[in-house]
Image (cartoon, rainbow, N blue to C red):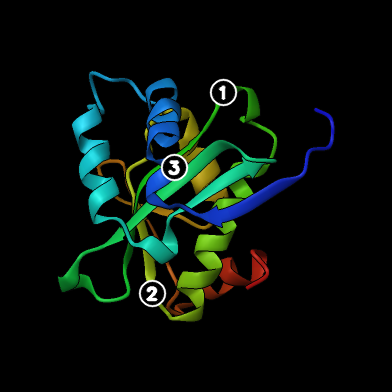
Amino acid sequence: MDTINIHIRQLSGSHYEKVKDIFQKAFDKNKYPEEDLETSWIERSHPDSFGFFVNERIIGFVIASYHSRNGSNMYIDYLALLPEFRGSGIGSILLRRLIERRYAVRGSLHLYPERDELLGWYKRHGFNETNKNYYVFHSYGTRKQHVLHKSLGL
């Protein structure tokens, strides 16, 4: 892939239709109905939900949220890229940004991988499976986590 200039920006209300277009291309509509996206969009953490832009074209996004009972534990509701940009490292940049932010406040990052082929990718980024396909990145410092954090450059 040629070098492209990517910008990461906070998502705003004007981005919803483009996010929805990417969502429809990236997710199985039988497993992930559009109504779920709309709920996540409304309840998203605005400072932690980002889009990837090439010029003014949005090519991917992350929608993140918090649950009041879980403090600084962030949940990745959706992380998606247009298919033609997958495998380019763009998703890793965005995931890394979220990890660094959670690590800085000693929080955790939680998600359900959308496709089985993503499991290894999440594991390489420091996520561990905790329950039936539920993955968590912890910032606390157990020996195992410390080694993992060091390998990630944190």
Residues marked 2 and 1 touching at CB (< 8 Å): no
Taking depth in this image into account, of 132 and 31 the one nearest to the observer is 31
2 or 1: mark nearer the eye: 1
Residue depicted at x 63% and y 22%: 84
3 or 2: mark nearer the eye: 3
Taking depth in this image into account, of 95 and 144 the one nearest to the observer is 95
Crowd band around label 2 with a 10 angstrom C-alpha radius: few (<14), some (14–19), many (20+)? some
Crowd band around label 1 with a 10 angstrom C-alpha radius: few (<14), some (14–19), many (20+)? few
Total residue callouts: 3
Q: Residue furthest right?
A: 2
Specify which label sits upstream in the sequence, 2 or 1. 1
Percent x, y of residue 81: 53, 34
* Residue at the disc numbered 3: 15
CA distance for labels 3 and 1 = 19 Å
* Residue at the disc numbered 1: 83
Q: Residue furthest left?
A: 69
Q: Give amino acid for label 3.
A: His
Q: Give amino acid for label 2.
A: Gly
